[in-house]
Amino acid sequence: MGETILQIKHLSKSFGENSVLRDIDFTVEKGDVTSIIGPSGSGKSTLLRCINLLETPTSGELLFHGGNIAGGSANIAAYRAKVGMVFQNFNMFANMTVLENCMIGQRKVLKRDRTEAEKTAKAYLEKVGMLPYINAKPRQISGGQKQRVAIARALAMEPEVLLFDEPTSALDPQMVGEVLDVMKALVKEGITMIVVTHEMAFARDVSSHTVFMKDGVICEEGTPEQIFVNPQKQETKDFLSRFFDR
């Protein structure tokens, strides 16, 4: 057994009468790449937003290194610095340069001085191939480039876990590959990741753990081989048949 970082226990989320997540359970260990797959509307993005506390779970526990951070007493900013998030629509500050976008979180949350924040930002921008664009504004770069900057921004906080909410869904097809290549490089470095994705080949080839969701519940989970090669539930088989010849 590795080091357990996150444990999601009996987590549920409702919006009024609408139950979006029901009794979600899974564990994330250091170095895991957990892919969350399933049809649209199955609660995948809501689950990620609950893990990052952008949404407050209605019930259940969210344990970070054994401490429940869903109870309302946690330092949410400090927690989010440890559990970073990459959004599908980039969420960059339009009036800031690429470099400034990658520095602001470090300055405000981690209280790094400008010199350290700039050095760290440049190191991660170089890692994702965006160092030549540090003075560009978001409107001056492509969607794929924006997403690579967003990844660098999240990495600059040096989180323990990185959450990706459908990071390629807002991109043109030719830009998807450049973002997936960056993510694959992060996997090789051992970065712990939870990825909500419709990129089934990526989930199959890169994950250590795959979670299939439907209608707000975990329908089936296991290794990529168990889910993609030998799924047990008919719902899983039906979903995957849209992506792979079976």
Image (cartoon, rainbow, N blue to C red):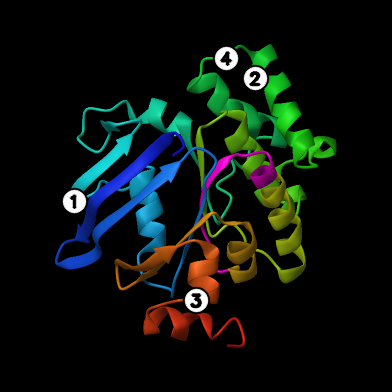
- The residue closer to the viewer here, 35 or 144, is 35
Distance Cα–Cα, label 3 vs label 1: 34 Å
Query: Marks 4/3: CA distance?
Result: 48 Å
Q: Horizontal placement of 98 versus 245: left or right? A: right
The amino acid type, in three-letter code, at marker 3 is Asn
Task: Give whichever of discs 2 and 1 has the lower sequence position.
Answer: 1
Helix, strand or loop at mark 4: loop
Q: Of circles 3 and 1, which is in front? A: 3
Q: Amino acid at mark 1?
A: Thr
Q: Quadrant of residue 154?
A: top right
Q: Counting other residues with Cα less than 10 Å from the Cα at mark 4, is it few (<14), some (14-19), or many (20 or more)?
A: some
Q: Residue at x 20, y 68 (%)?
A: 18
For label 2, the SS is helix
> Is 195 one of the magenta-colored residues?
yes
Residue position for label 2:
117
Is 11 rendered above or below residue 229? above
In the rendered image of this protein, does residue 203 appear above or below residue 124?
below
Residue that label 4 marks: 112
Mark 1 residue element? loop
Which mark, residue 58? 1
3D distance between C-alphas at marks 2 and 1: 36 Å
The answer to whether any part of residue 17 appears in the image is: yes
Residue most extreme to the right: 132
Cα gap from disc 3 to disc 2, whole angstroms: 46 Å
Residue occupied by mark 3: 230
